Every structure is written in structure tokens, then in C-alpha cells.
Amino acid sequence: MSDNGSNGTGFIGASLKRKEDARFLTGRGRYTDDINLPGQLYAHLLRSTVAHASLGSVDTSAAKAAPGVHAVFTGADMEHVGGVPTGWLIHSKDGSPMVEPKHPAMAVGKVRHVGEIVAIVVAETRDQAREAAALIDVDYQDLPAVASLEAARADGAPKVWDEADGNLCYDWEVGDRAAAEAAIDGAAHVVSIDVVNQRLVPNAIEPRAAIGNFDPTTDEYTLYTTSQNPHLIRLLLGAFVLGLPEHKLRIVAPDVGGGFGSKIPHYAEEAILTWTAGQLCRPVKWTSDRSEAFVSDTQGRDHLSTATLGLDQDGRFVGLKVSTKANLGAYLSTFATCVPTYLYGILFAGPYTTPAIYVEVEGVFTNTVPVDALRGAGRPEATYLLERLVDKAAAATGIDRVDIRRRNFIREFPYQTPVALQYDQGDYDATLDLALSAADWDGFEARRSEAGSRGKLRGIGISTFIEACGIAPSAVVGSLGARAGLYEVGSVRVHPTGSVSVFTGTHSHGQGHETTFAQIVAETLGVDFEAVDVVHGDTNAIPFGMGTYGSRSLAVGGTAIYNAVQKVIAKGRKIAAHLLEASEEDIEFADGNFTVAGTDRSKSIGEVALTAYVPHNYPEGLEPGLEETAFYDPLNFTFPAGTHIAEVEVDPETGVVELVSVTGADDVGRIINPMIVNGQLHGGLAHGIGQALLEHCEYDAEGQLVTGSYMNYTMPRAGDLPNFNINHNTTHCTHNPLGVKGVGEVGSIGVPPAVINAVVDALSPLGVTHIEMPATSERVWQAIQAAQAQD
Amino acid sequence: MDDFQYHAPSSVDGVLSALRGADDGKVLAGGMSLLPVMKLAMAAPSDLVSLRNVPGLSDIEDHGHCLKIGACCTHAQVAASSVVRERIPALAAMAGRIGDPQVRNRGTIGGSVAHNDPAADYPAACVGLGATIITDRRKISSDDFFGAMFETPLEEDELVTAVCFPIPDRAAYAKFENPASKYAVAGVMVAEDSDGVRVAVTGAGAGVFRVAEMEAALADDFSADAVAGIGVSSDGLLSDNVAGAEYRAHLVTVMAKRAVEACG
């Protein structure tokens, strides 16, 4: 085996076409809503139309009498079941645990956001359920709502939860406050910035759906659901909400059309549908429509921050202090509490050697849809703030934007940051150099003046960043408050004739695991790519797993599969040694063949597999069969890094920003399938560009969602994006055998500050120093007007 | 979406009688405005009367002094029509920028004018070019047809059958579109013919409107500079999450200027 884990069959590193695409592209994917069970009923969920109210009577009598209706349940009917749990306990600065109100599956006593579930109506048809729901008379006694961070933290603000004073869930910190403040106080230059990281709607192409089923003959429940992590749902739904043991609860997450984090959480709908199926002993299906998704899928980001950076006379960063308010929404979603803390605060070293860093975060309740992970989850927020601040520092010190970054790069690894993380490997100069060259950074001024001759303001922006992926070492995250381990599980079953089934606890909802994982197994086991199929998304088929998020599937799940393959090879070596009448130590494995060292005597993996299942001539005491499982708990996070450069042209008359080019130089670790990796980069870049220029989830002061459809929530379209100039400079992760890091979130983390830095650069001749995301045409126009008014 | 009765008669008279027989009947052409509001339960007509089987509503005729465009012509059809492109290129270009390809292949000129969405493009084209709306029973000038938001003089049982556009000496449409919906935030049609200059604005206000000051200035001096200094008041203009009234007012001037420039 070569040093990169390859047997040399060439599957690793090849842009093989995706196994899953044939069914997706021909409309044969099997999504939750495609599944129909015998005797299935349909549910409609009645949702709150107000952001905050005491719930008076909920009169369901007319709905129950409506045609086709089987049942109507409200919060009172489910009050005895557990609340929807939160996966991460955060402690405040004073050591007190976060405020963790019970999250009932359906509203009890009060509603706290538009879209909260008030009742479920189950009928023979979807239309009957919907029409009956309109007959439910809900007495909403309006309460004042807090729909923004400012409103929630204002003196005397209305309270979302009686037990949360100041609407504070927690007041968390990381790093050394005294050291950071002292460093800033003694700094030669001090720069500050206030930034908004606006709320986003995830907008997976497949809306969420769920089918609950109960088999009274076996007392088994089955839930089909649009989830990124079926075992996690089984754990939370079974142990915390409904009190069902694992062997009586099966979760199936079939083909899932995108998640972006919004399909990580355990949702109340999953509990309601499962419970309702048990009440009725009939399958019950619910499918969200797009309008419903806007007010019921968890949303992302939503921070207000202020940060101060101290620099010495040479432009070296000496101290950084960050204060952030993070909107958690009305209820604590599964990972809501850790996203703005342990996925955010610990990123603030970035690629820089800042020796003293302090980050404090207020987690705040508001009368809005719960916030949870969204592609990047905390890391885009940290990176955006840091990279805007670095640009501001360059402007304040007069040091070139590229030079100031280079002066502060970490170059010795492993590197212990002042905010908990230890980076294992990286080469930030290499990705920076590659990006500068690929983007023709040095030629920019000529392009700026050419644009000027056309009346356009051209700007260029850069962002150099790291991310922490491959979530996560269980003991580490456990000590930080995680209520689950974050290892992963892989099983490799070599069948008697040599084909292979691979079982993974991760879940593919667009990432291409069926292809990438098959490439790893085909290469390391020396079998044909076509002979390997990957199974995921069914708790009855897969031993266990923690699912897909945080760019973890390859680094953690892929390593589990790799380790399972090594166990298969180890057992195969024993069988081959027996067949070849050689000592086990003399057997070498390569290209799918077990060979006696120094001879041409060998047995193929196929022959060994057949022997394992037909063990007539077999090592004494060895179990038949060739199937192994590995649980892999990572030793550390992985640290992808890179440089992104964006170039824009602004029309000063209208404020329209045209994104002219995007160049990336990324180190995502060892690449298994370059086509899939580039596809992930493209998707992430589109997501990040959407945040920088287009997307903005807005509520009015009463907590009504203003941007509740694609008529006013701007998703990026192909026409909004340039061709991406993607480049790779790879260093290998040092602590997993494949050397892989992760790629799914890179674009959404790295590119937003590059785009905004470019917009500010374009406007800087007019005196504009900052613009908030999204940099819409109206905002840019207003910034130009304001700057001109100052002249 | 609530249930409804669907009709597809094969004549204009059949359409009218189906409308008269319905509690709350609506004409269905391309459905690009009607179906979304029905999906959102903002409209729940008892009957939909489709025009798909009515012959003769999709013709484009050159009458010398004007083009007569059948009510069921899709935006894509108008955009691609060689006669429209030759005779009123501004109209073809305008139609080619409505919505997205799916909308352009379903949405119709008749549906657009009858709906009178304040952010639709056709009202500006009709008013700017001085078009006449032809119904089953009468002809209505554009200036009289387009009222406030979603309002027209059409009777409950009246059907738009065609729109006649006089041939201008020169015309152009400039549009600033909503990045999400692709509707006009400010769309300005500028046209000049022997009767003078017309400047019609859609998207910015509660309905299409003309800008007399710009028309007079252009009649005197047909140049971008002539309108560059003419602002419209932001009073009464629309305001939403994409564009406030002041920005819209500013965009009206910029789009007017660009339309004049595009007239060549």
C-alpha cells in the first residue's frame, strides 16, 4: 500500500460518475413523499398565525365532524409525552446551565412563533385534512412579541419564556478575557467593527415529510422521515420524547433532497406523526409545502457582533475580542445551542497567530422560527467577522490586504490556538499564492480602470480562512456539553461471490456517498467499483451512526469504513494463509490479492470470501463469514483551509453588484472524487454568494415572516453566478488514515467575506468602509448616497 | 388549492356563457398569476374557464399602422415573433424579459393585461405604446384600461381577445427587476410617434402611470440628458423588502434615461 492509503487500483482520486445519479436524473429517486403504505391517512398540521399569544380554547369539534376526518389532536392530547430535546448543554460564564425550557411537540398554553404547531388533523385525504383544519377555532390572546435580537435584549422587553430573564438562554465565553483586553490596550493599532450576520432560510429542494406507522402485532413503530441522521432521530425520539426502546422503533430516511443542516434536528413533526400513528394504528403521512417550510424548517445564522482587533507596529495581531448576540428563535432546536458557541467561538484564530483571543456570546430567545445549523453552522459567521475585521485592519494600518494576512499566518504545526482547537496541518501560504496567481490579483488595477471607463466601479476582495470539520472527538465534545458521542460506524459485508455491501451511519442527501465510499472500498479491498454498493438511511439495516453534518461524513464515516475494510483484510489474511499453507505474517495484500511474500502464490479476495462462507477447508477456530464493523471516534477535528477571491463590478447609478469572478484555492485534504469535490465546492460557493448578495430572512416587529416565499426571498440562480475558478493545494490530515478533511461547507464559509470585501473595495474610492450582507442594490445605492452626502 | 369546476369551451360565446353560469368564475389563460394565488388560497374561484380550445386567439396580425396580438399569445411567442421583432422590437424585447422561461412559455398577453398587476411589464408596454385593448364587445384605450392595482374596467363576463399596438417611430423598455420574483421594480417604456412621446412606468407605483414632465422634455429634446434631471415623487410609490419608495423613484429616472438611450 502506498503512503496515501491506496492499493493503486486508481479508484481513489478518479472522477467517477455518481452511482446515484441514474435514479435521480430519471425521476426514480425514492423520497419520503414517494412512499405510500397500505391504509395510509393524511395529516395537516395547523400552525400558529401569530408570533406570541396565550392559547385560549382550541375548539376542534367542527373539524372532528368534517368529512373523512379520523382524528384531531392538540397539545393537550400530547402533553404527557416528553419535550423535544436539545443536544448540547451550554454553561454561562458564571457556571450556571443554560435556560432550557420544555419544548412540547404541540403548543401548550402559549404559542411562541408563527408556524408553531397547534393541532394535527388526520383524514382520508390531504384535502379533507386541510379543509377540516380550517374549521378549528383557536382563541389566540395576543402577547407582545420580540422578533429581533435588539428587541429581545432591550430593557423591559417582553419575555419569550418566563424563566429566561432578558430572554437570555446563556451568556457564554471562551478564551482569556484579561489577556485579550490587555493586549488590545497595549496595541499600536486598534480597529473595531460591528457586523450583522443575517438570518437565512435553508431551502432544501425537497420539503420535509414524515410517515408514522405502527404495527400492533409487533408493537413496532416505523418513521419515514427527511433526515440527515436517522439514528440520532431514533435516539432522541425514542429515549426522550415517546419513551420507545430502540428495538421497537425504526427510522428510515430514504432519498433526501438536500438538507444543508435543516434536516439535522429532531422535529416535533416526527414525534407527532409517530405518536398519532400509534393512536390510530394506521400509517399517517405529512408533507410540508414550501410556504410551510418557510415557517417550520429551522433557519440559520442571525448574529449581531462587535469585535476589536489589536495590532503591533508591524501589523501583527496581538489581541482579539468578540462580543456576539446569537438569535436562537423561540425554542431550542437540537444543535441550536452549540452552533453559535462551540462551532463559532473557537474558530476565531482563523489561520492567524493571534496570541490572545476572547469571545463572548449571548444566546437569545425571540418569537421567531428556531435557529439551528445551516451549511457551515457558526464557522461562516466567525469567518465573515474575522475577514471583514482583517480588511479593516489593513485599511487602518495602511498595510496591503494580502501582506497583512501573510504576516499573521500560522506556519508551524501542530498549532495550539488560544481558543481550544489544535490545528494538525496546513499550508496557508500555498493556497494564498495559488489563489493570487489564479485570480491574477496583480493585474487587477488594469481591470479596475477598464471598468471605470465603462462607468463601473470594480473591486476585488480576499478571504483566507480555516474551518473545523470532521465533527468530532466524542470525549472532547462531551466535556464541552454535547449529549451524544460523535463517532461514526461503518460495516463492510463481503458476500460469498465477492461483491460488497457497505453500511454507513452517515446519510447522503446530495453528497454522493454511494460513489465516494464505494471508491474507498473498491480501492482498499481491490474489488471492482461496480461490485460495491453503499447502504444508508435505515436504522434496521445499519448498526449505528451519528449522521451527516459538519463536513464529517468522509473524515469520520469514511474512516470507519476504511477501518472496517482493514478488519476484513486482517481476517482474509488468516484465511488466505490457511489456504496457501503459509504463515499469516508472510501474507501480503495488494490489488485484491493475498500473496505469499516473495512468491507468485496468491488467493484473490473473491476466493477468500467464498472460502469464508463455504468453510470446508478453513482455519481452526476462525468464525465463518466475511463481515466487519468499525466504530471510529476521531482524534481531532479536521482543518480544511483556503483562500477565496471575488471580483465585482458595481453600477453606481443603480447599486447593482455584478459578481464578475470567484477564484478559490482550497485545501480540503485528500480528494477521493475530484468531480464530487468540485461539485460540493460549487454548491457551497453558491450558498455563500447567496448570503453575501441575495438572501435575507426578515421578520416584521410583530414576528410575521416578511420573506415567506420565493417572490421575496432571493435564492441564487445560475445567472447570478460566474464560472468558478477552483484550484486545489492539498495537505493531508495527519490523524485519519485517508488524510481527508471535508469539503461540503467550504464555499459557504470562505466566500461571503471575499465578496463583501470586494464590494467595499469597489466603493472605497467613494469613502464607503462597510456594507452589510446581503449587499443588495438598494443597500449599495444608499451607501453611495450616504458617502456622497458626507463629501 | 380548493376544488373548482373546469370548463374548456371552444368559442368566445362558450367562454362568456360559462362565466355567466358560474358563482365566481375566472378565465384561465396561462395561469401564471391565477394559479399561484389559488395555491396560496388567496383566491378560490368556483369555476375556471380555460381559453385553450378557443380558436383564433393566438394570432399576430400586421395591420399596417398597428400590430394586433391575440390575447392567448404567450410572452415567448411575442418575443420570438418575426413581425413583432421587425415592427416593434421594444415590445418583443420586453416580452422576452418577463419572468423566466417557464413563465414566458405559459403566460399570455391577455392574462397579463386583464390581471393588471402593478409590477407586470405589459401595462407599461400598453400605456407607453398607446395600445388599445380589444374585448368581446368593445375597444378600450390603455389610458382608460389600467386603473389602480388589479383594477380594470372589464365586466365580470368580459373577455380580452386582443391588444392592438400602434407602430412607434422609436421605442424602448428598460426594466429594473426584483431579484427574487423577476417582476419590475421600475420598468419604463418610452415611445415616440407622430402624436408625441409617451413615458409609462410600471412596478414603481400602485399601477402603471405616465410621467408628463418627462414626455414634455423628450418631445422637446429626445435625449437621455433631457430626463436625467427629472425625478418623480416618492409619495405613493410602492415600498417593499427589495426597494423602498425613494429608491424606486430614483430607479424610475435611471430606467427612463436608459430607455431613451436604447431608443438610439
Image (tube, rainbow, N blue to C red):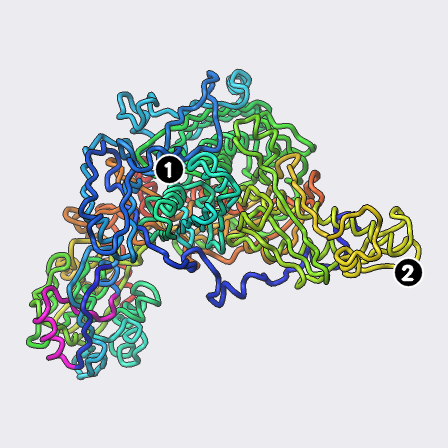
Q: Is residue A783 found inside the magenta-colored segment of the image?
A: no
Residue picked out by circle 1: A370
Whether pointer 2 and pointer 1 mark residues with C-beta atoms closer than 8 Å, the reply is no
Q: Magenta segment, which residues?
A: B11-31
Q: Nearer the viewer, mark 2 or mark 1?
A: 2
Can residue A769 be seen here? The reply is no
Question: What amino acid is at disc 1?
Answer: Pro
Above or below, B31 relative to A340: below
Looking at the picture, how far across and down is residue A430, in whole percent? 66, 44
Q: Is residue A118 left or right of residue A412?
A: left
Can residue A199 be seen here? The reply is yes
**Image mark 1: chain:** A
Which label was assigned to residue A600? 2
Q: How many neighbours does mark 2 have within 10 angstroms: few (below 14), some (14-19), or many (20 or more)?
A: few
Residue at position x 56%, y 49% in the image: A664
Q: Nearer the viewer, residue B224 or A28?
A: A28
Residues flagged by tags 2 and 1 on a common chain: yes
Above or below, B71 relative to A568: below
Residue at position x 40%, y 26% in the image: A100
Q: Is residue B21 found inside the magenta-colored segment of the image?
A: yes
How far is disc 2 from disc 1 in space, using C-alphas? Answer: 63 Å
Q: Nearer the viewer, residue A70 or A715?
A: A70
Looking at the picture, how far across and down is residue B101, in whole percent? 35, 67
Chain-order first, disc 2 or disc 1: 1
Q: How many neighbours does mark 1 have within 10 angstroms: few (below 14), some (14-19), or many (20 or more)?
A: many
Q: Is residue A344 left or right of residue B112?
A: right
- Secondary structure, mark 2, is loop
